[in-house]
Image: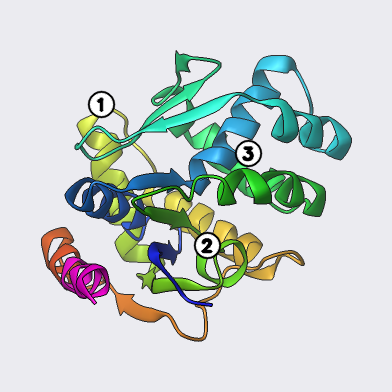
Amino acid sequence: MIQPTIITIDGTAGSGKGTLAMRIATDLNWHLLDSGALYRLVAYAAIQQGIDYSDESGIERIAKEMDIAFIPTGGKLVEVLLSDINVSDAIRTEDCGYGASKVATYGLVRKALLQRQRDFHQAPGLVADGRDMGTVVFPNAGLKIYLNASAEIRAKRRQQQLKENGVNVNMPRLIRDIEERDARDMGRKDSPLKPADDAIVIDTDHLGVDEVYRIVLQKAQTLVLS
């Protein structure tokens, strides 16, 4: 059965899905699920507790037990709470991004987080951002969006973000890191990154944030009003 009160936004790292999901959720006054932040939270908690990424059982325990909350702010990023502590900035580091793609390869971890993600679906509706939202977590979502962009374009966007925060990065290395993460996400055995069969695929290489937002908002409003 189609669930018209769920919109999924999947895509590659750095394709703009997080910002888009935030804006759509804010405009519709719906709940927001940043599933990528879940895996970043697991990685962050593992670092804090001194648990190696190779310790699958230890990582699974974290995924089951961590106390989390997402609060839309109307800005570019969702506010992320871990045990009532704001860790929004702490989980956005390159180390946590790397860790997230590592722990996400574990089937036990994905299984532990599956129902927690589905529990975010509450009235009036949910916008879910991630990599397997439309294929695995919410396969019956009323609207499925898949964003993509070349590694070079995504690297330039990431470089600009880091530059604004006073961080200089090596562009060739950044491109390589993005390509390696794509390979991990798309090649993992459990819930690989790919568009759902009924997803609307949008290439954002030559589209600005506002253009993508207008396209998706129009489709979202059509869904809500139908």
Residue 71 position, x and y percent, is 35, 31
Residue 81 higher or lower than 16, as above or below: above
Q: Is residue 94 above or below residue 218?
A: above
Magenta range: 215-226
- Residue occupying the far bottom of the picture: 197
**Which label sits in the foreground, 2 or 3?**
2
Q: Is residue 203 visible?
A: yes
Q: Amino acid at mark 1?
A: Gly
Q: Position of residue 153 (x, y in %)?
A: 30, 63
Q: CA distance from mark 2 to mark 3?
A: 20 Å
* Above or below for 86 versus 55: above
Residue under pointer 1:
166
Residue nearer the viewer, 43 or 182? 43
Identify the element where label 3 is drawn: helix
Name the kind of residue labelled 3 in the image: Gly
Q: Quadrant of the N terminus?
A: bottom right
The residue sitting at 30% across, 48% down in the picture is 30
Query: CA–CA distance between discs 3 and 1?
Result: 23 Å
Q: Sequence-wise, which precedes: disc 3 or disc 1?
A: 3
Name the colouring of the figure: rainbow
Mark 1 to mark 2 CA distance (whole Å): 33 Å
User: Which residue lies under the disc numbered 2?
Assistant: 133
- Please say whether residue 223 is one of the residues in the magenta stretch: yes
Marks 1,2: beta carbons within 8 A:
no
SS of the residue under disc 1? loop
Magenta region's main secondary structure? Answer: helix
The numbered mark at residue 99 is: 3
Q: Residue at x 49, y 14 (%)?
A: 84
Does 164 appear in magenta?
no
